[in-house]
Image (cartoon, grey):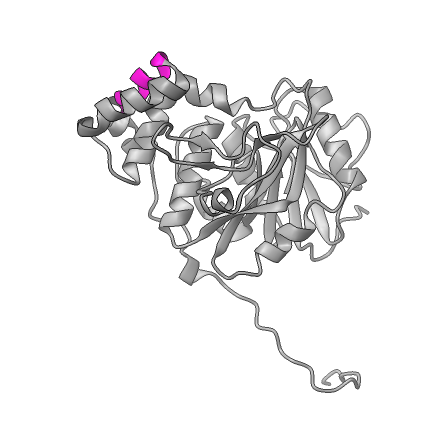
Amino acid sequence: MPKFPTIPRLSIVVPYRGDGESFENTLASVLQHRPDACEVIVPHAGNYDDPFHLGDEVRFIETASSFTKQIGEAAAIAHGRFVHVLSDGYQATQDWTRSAFDAFEQHETGAVVPVVRRSDSEEIVHAGWQRTGRSACDLIGAGSNSLASKQLRSVEGGFLSASFWRRDLLRSLTESFRSDHAVEASMVFGLLTRKAGWKSVCDPECTLRLSEDSTTGDDYASQVTRNHRRLQAIADHFGSGGWGKSLGRLISTTLSGGFGSAVARATAPLAANTIAASLRSQHVLRSDEQEEPIRIPVSSDLPLRRAA
């Protein structure tokens, strides 16, 4: 019989995105450092045949090929109260989930953002994202070795491919946006989470490593540059935008991200209707709707007797 925990606290989702070596390295790191009381779920589009016979340790499920749909279908069958998405290219580290659980002790914490570092140094790749004057999706901590308190407080969301979630919140988000673009979905999920009264919290003690040779290592800075119009349209949908701010964005983004990205960001209103039509936010779980377990204090050390 499979050796899955009967009541896992955490479900770790490792989607298979087509790069066998990168995926297997990530999965191996998860199994090597696997925390207690967890299950591991691998969604794939019918194109992974488990060559290492891990069926006793991993739940393989056949899903759609879409990255966001894979996560949604895995979350739908997850048993854990919390879900950790870890895409290929990332490497789990010793005890990396421990402090993430501590962050979830806060009632309003809906998502926890890990710090992703290079595999061969302490350089930060990303520790979540925020909206700034120079970018619709500014990578927090990128290129530095440490995070200031101000940066930790400014996190608006994490990237879906390396993130922790309350399971029921993630389930409610997976049908909220029709797009398979990882950065777009990450922004929408983060902003909808915030709108529903939750917080996304960066945990500086939760460290993941990014393989240098990964072909799916998510070069988010380049993705933001190439897709700045739609990302800014997403940011505007949850804030304030319009043509009146275009000139200021053109100037500020030219100085930091180049002219092409600046023009794309300045013309975000052209994508506003498309973004709005792709959003379905009415079923996102609100913070005040979550179910909380009730802890019953035990006043005696004597064993409890079972009722007849």
Q: Which image quarter: residue 81? A: bottom right
In depth, the one of 139 and 219 nearer the eye is: 139
Left or right of 122, for residue 286? left
In depth, the one of 63 and 297 nearer the eye is: 297
Q: How far from the left and from the top, in percent, is residue 83?
A: 60, 47
Residue 218 can be seen in this image: yes
Left or right of 10, for residue 140? left
Residue 35 versus residue 184 in the image, above or below: below
Q: Residue at x 38, y 28 (%)?
A: 135
Q: Is residue 10 within the magenta segment?
A: no
Q: Which residues are magenta?
A: 259-269
Q: Which image quarter: residue 142? A: top right
Residue 144 versus residue 97 in the image, above or below: above
Q: Residue at x 69, y 57 (%)?
A: 7
Left or right of 27, for residue 225? left
- Residue at the left extreme of this rendering: 244
